[in-house]
Amino acid sequence: MRRFNNNKMRAQRVLMKYTQEELASITNLSVFTISRIESGAAENLRLETLYSIAKALLLDPEDLLMEDSDEKGGEQN
């Protein structure tokens, strides 16, 4: 099963010098949602949310996914 890699999202956002507020504005998501996604508290992201975040961060949506066995820090709790 594949999971959203919240650590990759956070790292790319920081690399692009976006605040959570700026990313929220670009993606039309709330700051609360961005924060929950980055912290790993959000589960079952909608595909449109994944695509919106990937587009804003100039990534392929696949880049924001990982296998369950990959990178333990990115697992959702």
Image (tube, rainbow, N blue to C red):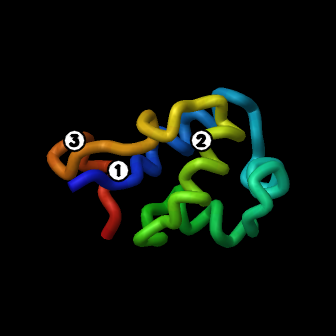
Three-letter amino acid code at the position of disc 1: Gly
Q: Which residue is mark 2?
A: 54
Q: Which residue is mark 3?
A: 70
| Residue type at numbered disc 3 | Asp
- Would you place residue 9 above or below residue 48 in this image? above
Find the distance from the CA under tag 3 to the CA under tag 1.
8 Å
In the rendered image, residue 7, in percent from the top left (x then y), is placed at 45, 44
Disc 3 vs disc 1: Cβ atoms closer than 8 Å? yes
Quarter holding the C terminus is: bottom left
Location of the N terminus by quadrant is bottom left
Q: What residue is shown at x 60% (from left), y 59% (from top)? A: 49
Q: Nearer the viewer, residue 21 or 65?
A: 65
Q: Residue at x 68, y 71 (%)?
A: 32
| Mark nearer the N terminus (3 vs 2) | 2
Say which mark, if any, is on residue 61: none
| Mark 3 vs mark 2: in front | 2
Q: Which residue is located at x 15 percent, y 46 percent?
A: 69
Q: Is residue 30 above or below residue 68?
A: below
Q: In terms of secondary structure, where does tag 3 sit? A: loop
Name the residue tied to disc 1. Answer: 74
Q: Is residue 57 left or right of residue 23?
A: left
